Every structure is written in C-alpha cells, then in structure tokens.
Amino acid sequence: MRMILKRIFFTSLILIACLSWSKAQQYPVFSQYYFNELVVNPAYAGNHVQLSLTAMYRNQWVNFPGAPKTFSFTGHTSLVKNKVGVGLMVNHDEIGSYKNEHIYTSYSYKIHFPEATLSMGIQAGINILGADYSKLDLQNPGDAAFYNILNEVKPNFGAGLFYTRKNFFVGFSVPFIINNEIANSVEGLLGNLQEARYYFLRSGVVFPIDRMKKVKMNPSILLRTQEGQPLSLDINNAFIFYDVFSAGVSYRSGDSFISFVDLKISESFHFGYSYDWTQSDLNRFSNGTHEFMLNYRTRLRGIHKDPKCPQYYDYR
C-alpha cells in the first residue's frame, strides 16, 4: 500500500512540476550558496582575489525516483590588481525526464573605497533545456506525443551588485533578465514553457563573540522572488571557530530546515556538507536532501602578485 501511495504521489508531483515549467523554467536552488555566492550573483566574481574553484552536488529528496539532482561548477578570479573579476558557472540540473543546463561567463568591475568595495557584475551565456518524454513511465507507452525529445538553446544575460564594508555585505542580482519562450513538444499538454526572471537580495555580517576573536557569528538572509511565485526567505546563522571550522542552521520559508558544516582542510581546500530537513508532505516519502561542496583556492603566478586575500569566512 505504501508503494502504491508513493507512486501516486510521485506521479502527481511530476505532473505539477510539468505544469510549473509551463510558466517558468526553474533555477537550481542550493543550500550552500552560503559558501559560493557566484551561483546567485555575478558581481561576486573575483571577490576571493585569488583563483577560486568550487564544485557542488545536490541530491534532493533521497529515495525518490526521478527526484532532482544538481551539479554545479564555478571558477572565478580577480585581475588587474583586483580591479576586475572574471568567472565561469556551469550548472546541470535534472528532474525526471527534464534536464536544464546553464553555461555562463561573468565579469565584475570593482570600485574600492577606504573601507569598502562596490562590485558591479554582469553575466552572459546560454540555457539548455532538454526533455526526453520517452523515459516517462506512461500508462499508454504507445502514445506518440511522448516520443518527442525537446532540446532548446536560449541565450540570456544577468546583472548584479555586491557591496562589502569590513565584515558586512549586501548584494542584489537578477541572473536571467530575458524571459525566453521555449517550444512545447508534447502537443499542447504543457502549454508554452518560459524562462523565469528571478530576483535575489542577499545580506549578512560576521562579528566576533569572544574577546580573543576566535569564535564568530555569521547571521545572513537570502530573499528570493520569482515572477508569478510567492516570496521565499532563507534565514541563516553560523558559528565560525578559529577560522577553521563553521557550523550552522538555516530556515527556508515553507520548505525546510537546513544544517550545514564547513571545514578548512588546508590553505587551499575547504569541504562543506549540508542536509535539508524537508517540512512538506514530501518527508513521508523521502530522506531529505544532501549537498556537498569542495572549494580550491590558489594564487596564479604572474597575476596575483602578493595579493591581500580575504579570510575564507570574511566577505572582503
């Protein structure tokens, strides 16, 4: 009986997801943007000064057949004596028979003040939407409408601002500005697919909570809104110990509680892990969401000559 209910629930979920995609193409949601701001704001490019490479993998709704799985790779560095930053972002997101990929390059220009920095960034690239309906578990496998394979490549661009002052930061971004329409390949079942315009507002602060400044607190928020969808708010708080290890929790409105840890393995490597405790009815059928992050940083000879690199847990 449980398996039957699970199958019915999942089939309904896929149908709802399909109908949602008829209005907006979904942008991957990560829990550890906390350690990789470039996934939400192109103005962050070069903020680490040295070359920074990050790989992230998200396995959502574990034990759910066809549940979302997302891989992300980003790389960015500063150039011209930290006056500009350049970056690359590659996302691969799939749910059921759908695949969504983003390949974007980013550029930021930095205005340095005595105690603050304002970064203005843009990104440009392509979104690739693919759907192989023949992989669906259909009641009527002979339905020719579901043998179509959808592949759409759409260019897009986005922009953002990122301001830091000592250990405070605030950023605003619109990753995709163009609402591209995507052809429908299922004979009108889904209507017209359309890429969504997202708006992100991100802010936070890092401050010591002991006299020796060995333990710090890092509260932050992420306000996310998508055209035609309700507002989403992430409230985060982390404790940073000796600039080597951090642990914290997040609350994503109407969706989940998140716990996360991050460990400085060496001067070059950091590892992060988060677990999403789903609060919706999905928790009856899944074992939550796992997310892994690995970050590598290094100075490039001839480009980064004695750079003043920020601490890993600082935002300058």
Image (cartoon, rainbow, N blue to C red):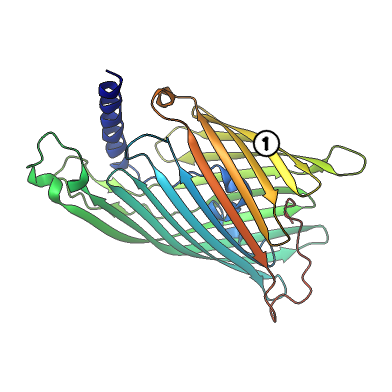
Could you say which is closer to the camera, residue 105 or residue 257? 257
Residue at 24% from the left image edge and 46% from the top image edge: 192
From the viewer's perspective, is 165 left or right of 70?
right
Residue at 17% from the left image edge and 39% from the top image edge: 189
Most distant residue in the top direction: 1
Residue 154 image-quadrant placement = bottom left
Residue 136 image-quadrant placement = top left
From the viewer's perspective, is 205 left or right of 95?
right
Residue at 45% from the left image edge and 47% from the top image edge: 28
Say which quadrant the C terminus sits in: bottom right
Q: Residue 52 location, x and y as percent?
A: 63, 63
Most distant residue in the bottom direction: 302
Question: Dot 1 corresponds to which residue?
Answer: 248
Residue 307 image-quadrant placement = bottom right
From the viewer's perspective, is 48 left or right of 131?
right
Q: Residue 231 location, x and y as percent?
A: 50, 33
Q: Residue 249 location, x and y as percent?
A: 64, 33
Q: Residue 1 location, x and y as percent?
A: 27, 17
Placement of 206 over or under 264, stated as above or below: above
Q: Amino acid at mark 1?
A: Gly
